Image (cartoon, coloured by chain):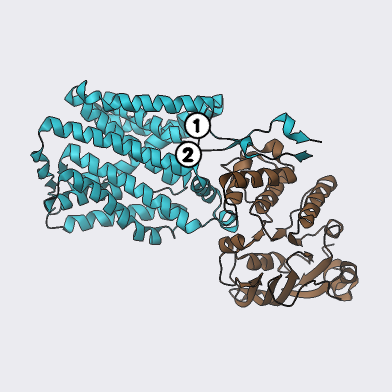
Amino acid sequence: MSLVVSPSMVQRWTRLSRRAAAAVVIVLLGLAVLPGVLGAGAIDRLAALFVYVIMAAMWNALAGYGGLVSVGQQMFFGLGAYFTVRLAETGLDPFVAMGMASLLVAVVSYPLSLVMLRLKGGEFAIGMWVVSALTHLMVNLDGLIQGETGRSLISLNAYAPGARRDIIYWLALVAMTGLLGGLFALLRNRTGASIQAIRDNEEAAGSLGIDVTRTKRLIFVLAAFGIGVAGALWLASATTFQPKTYFSVQWTAYMIFMVLVGGIGRFEGAILGAVIFFLIETWFGALGVWYLIGLGVVALLFSLFMPLGLWGAIETRFGVSLMPVGYRLEIPPQSRKD
Amino acid sequence: MSVDSGDGAGASRFSGSGITKRFGALAVLESVDFSMGMDEAVGIVGPNGAGKTTLLATLSGAYQPSAGAVTFGGHDVTRLPAAARCRLGLVRTHQVPKPFSGMTTFENVYVAAAHGDVRSRDEAYERAIDALNLCGMLAVANRQAETLGLLDRKRLELARALATGPKVILLDEIGGGLTDSEAQELVQTIQELRRRGIGIVWIEHIVHVLLQVVERLICMDAGRIIADGEPQAVMSDPEVVRAYLGGSTQ
């Protein structure tokens, strides 16, 4: 059978996903004007949601697309906050310090990637946790932090409480939009396909000309940067930095929860998972220990009965993709010649 | 009786000289000399454990040789990893297929095409579609690779290798486990690669399938090349008969 080959046979956007993209733009514009509408408490909570979305998307990028399951991502969350405190002490504006701290996290993650990406599978996962614990201890040694005494982002007081809240909200919104938009663009281009190929079979990916090391490093540094941003944002709304709060493995546990429940390896999955986690926390967070037990049970049930997560199940059942990063081949009948 | 069409070790040849590969104390390849024109089709046969796959893996860059050198089209590629050799036009398929399970068939082939010498995304698309068409895989283009059966996994190995835009393809038992009619389809596909001027190195146990494509045959035994030349002559070589045909395996 001969075939008239045309690149137009490859479909990426669908009518549905174009509508979804338009809806996303409208939702984001709506979110941008909310500080004038909602009360202080709601704005704080929404800023937290944006941070959760960032964390879920970044862990999903690393583990779901890159196959790099890490239990140590709290290291970057903690460093994002710690560097912010440190830089703000030099007299830098706290919001400028947050941006620079996030970049610094990315810079630090680069040499770390040279070592950690030599590890595979479980060794990488646990190795990251070990390095995270070491980083925590090193931060404890800083005279400014004084062990677990901690330090506040005092310079935030230069801003009036209302203005501060709105700025943090908008920064979180912009960071979420920028990071997820950038990640989406990355996953849709050639690099995105390479990342997934490496996840599925590293040796085959290498034998087809993919630069395995460079590609893995890219996703590692990106995830570190994004989670560093999340840590800096969290510090800005909480104002106090105490190492054990930020370097706690619970942050990674939350990321895993959000991604597993929402749908690992699905762009929409991480966002949906973050929203679900946010709702559960909002409704049941006050229950303390029972809340955490509930989270564990939910995660267990999902991994047993819905291993693709909620969005994975929807996608398989209905064949829908709102934010497609993949490729579909559609051969029109008239291009086949016999 | 060499069927070589080239000029020694120049720009139009693919050669390995003195290739030795040891795993600990075990020498799997012992000073193997191999050379072919870039558009030649060479078959490799030999009993199990002869070192055929190891030779292919060493030529393609999956393994570094313990000693010896590999040159490809005038480049010394001995220290280059597989990815860099692939970008020069040397690619292999795997005996046990290694699909990217979580991606569709088309995406598997596209990612290979996108890392070839294409100038644009559209060109990569065209090359991927062409490779799928040639390997008879258009019907399963949107299936997840993990759902493919053995025949399609074998075809996918070939389609992906083809999509990289190779000068030479190393095929490792791509016909193994296929029925006669499936193997015939495969022969037609590989003959089409030959018409496109792509060099072939093909390890295969099914000799009559192999002989439909190659004009030169190498027989290996115990990490060495024991015969090399015109296929009928190699198959009737006394040492080949003893080591391979007369052995307990066939």
Quarter of the rendering containing residue B193: bottom right
Image point (39%, 42%), residue name: A182
Sequence-first tag of 2 and 1: 2
At x 49%, y 48%, the residue is: A191
Q: Colour of chain A?
A: cyan
| Number of marks in the rendered image | 2
For disc 1, the marked residue is: A312
Amino acid at pointer 2 = Gly
- Measured as percent of width and height from the top left, residue A36 is found at 20, 23
* Chain letter for mark 2: A
- Could one spot residue A71 in this view of the protein? no
**Can you give x and y, in whole percent of width and height, for residue A156 in the image?**
12, 41
Q: Which chain is brown?
A: B
> What is the crowding at mark 2: few (fewer than 14 residues within 10 Å), some, or many (at least 20)?
many
Residue A229 appears left or right of A94: right
Would you call the spot at circle 1 few (<14 residues within 10 Å), some (14-19), or many (20 or more)?
many
Q: Residue at x 19, y 43 (%)?
A: A95
> Which of these two is toward me, B189 or A109?
B189
State yes or no: discs 2 and 1 in contact (Cβ < 8 Å). Answer: yes
| C-alpha gap between disc 2 and disc 1 | 9 Å
Looking at the picture, tell me which residue is in the foreground, A323 or A135: A323
- Quarter where residue B149 is shown: top right
Image quadrant where residue A107 sits? bottom left
What's the chain of the residue with tag 1? A
Q: Is residue A26 above or below residue A63?
A: above
Q: Which mark is residue A265?
A: 2
Dot 1 falls on a residue whose secondary structure is helix
Q: Is residue A99 left or right of residue B231?
A: left
Is residue A108 found left or right of B100 in the rendered image?
Answer: left
Is residue B130 among what the camera can see?
A: yes
